Amino acid sequence: MSNQAKENSRATLVADLVSLAQEPTSEKRVELLRRITDAYIDQADKCTAAERYLFNEVVSALVDKVSSAVRANTSAKLARLPVFSSELAGKLAKDADIDVARPIIRDYKGLPEHILVDVAKTGSQAHLSALAGRPALTPPVSDVVVARGDDKTVKILAANRGAQFSDFGMQSLIDKSEGDADLQALIVAREGLPLTAIARLLPLISDELASRLREVSVRIDDVAIEKHLGDWVIERQHNVHRTDAYIKSIRNGDLNPDDVVREVVATGRLFDATTVVASVLELDRFFTFNTIATGKVQSALLLLRAVELSWPVAEAFINLRIAKAGILEYEAPPTREDYFCIDVGAAQRVVRFMKVRRTAAAVDKAAS
């Protein structure tokens, strides 16, 4: 289409929009509605903001005044667009006539999640069935469909590979499958079934399905272990390099220990945080880890005080130790006063004494 032809088409669209808004005759309204819908679809990506606004305003006002067949035809055409007004899309998706709502619910990719959730909460079983067959569904939508859907709808949803579920939604789906072998088979056939879901399913299903499920779960478990192990190794290597860079910067005077430990503790890396402390104190990192992570809390506080960490950082360190190592050998966690009762000079002298003892022990061990 030439530029002149495009300009003429756009001018016609605007003129038709104005005419449609003023047209009192039902038959002509229908004719104009069809014409401007086709014109809008043909050039939707070229329309100006004003044209899109006019289209939305006029069509939104008219869809309630034409027959269901015309609304359904308009809905089917608009569902093919990558994007159009959310307000109009929501109006069509919530239409009581499922022939009008279905194309938008099932096929319109641009339909916002909050509208899908609203349709799931308020729509009929026919609306829920259309939702269940949508190519992609997020957990907030799927979970509502599971809760409200009848047996037919829930089976459509279970068979939908594009539907995602929260843990609660999957549990609800499994609960609904009790005594329903067909639904159980659909759940068993789903890819990427969480191990928690497999554990819930096993007591409910037949021996044949259980055997199939166990085969799948073994494969899932192997793949999951291999993937997570690979991810862990990569992450661990990255953390080692990052920790070494931090230590080098501390030694060069570019960073101070308090800032570094604060950041490492905030990311939940207990071993790396103790490695930084060990480097500052020139202690063996494994000895330092055992002292801070698994030793008495007073010993841990003493090492942190020797580094002269601020109380907020020391407190976060102790909280991470509790969360990671599961150690809480005291009635209440140490306080700021407990921490500052430890003199920095005294703590550093204790550390020097510990290093002398460890060095002497190593020499004795080598001589024996």
Image (cartoon, grey):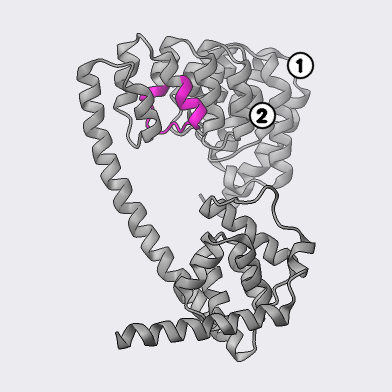
Which quadrant of the figure has residue 148? top right
**Please, what secondary structure does the residue beneath circle 2 have?**
helix
Q: Amino acid at mark 2?
A: Leu
Residue range corresponding to the magenta coloring:
157-172
Q: Which mark, by number, is residue 263? A: none
Query: Is 163 in the magenta?
Result: yes
Identified at 69% across, 16% down, the residue is: 64
- Answer with left or right where residue 249 lies relative to residue 131: right
- Answer with left or right where residue 334 lies relative to residue 352: right
Q: Closer to the camera, 214 or 361?
A: 361
Reading the image, the residue beneath label 1 is 24
Q: Which mark, by number, is residue 88? A: 2
Quarter of the image with the C terminus is: bottom left
**Please, what secondary structure does the residue beneath circle 1 have?**
loop
Q: Closer to the camera, 145 or 47?
A: 145
Query: Is 100 in the magenta?
Result: no
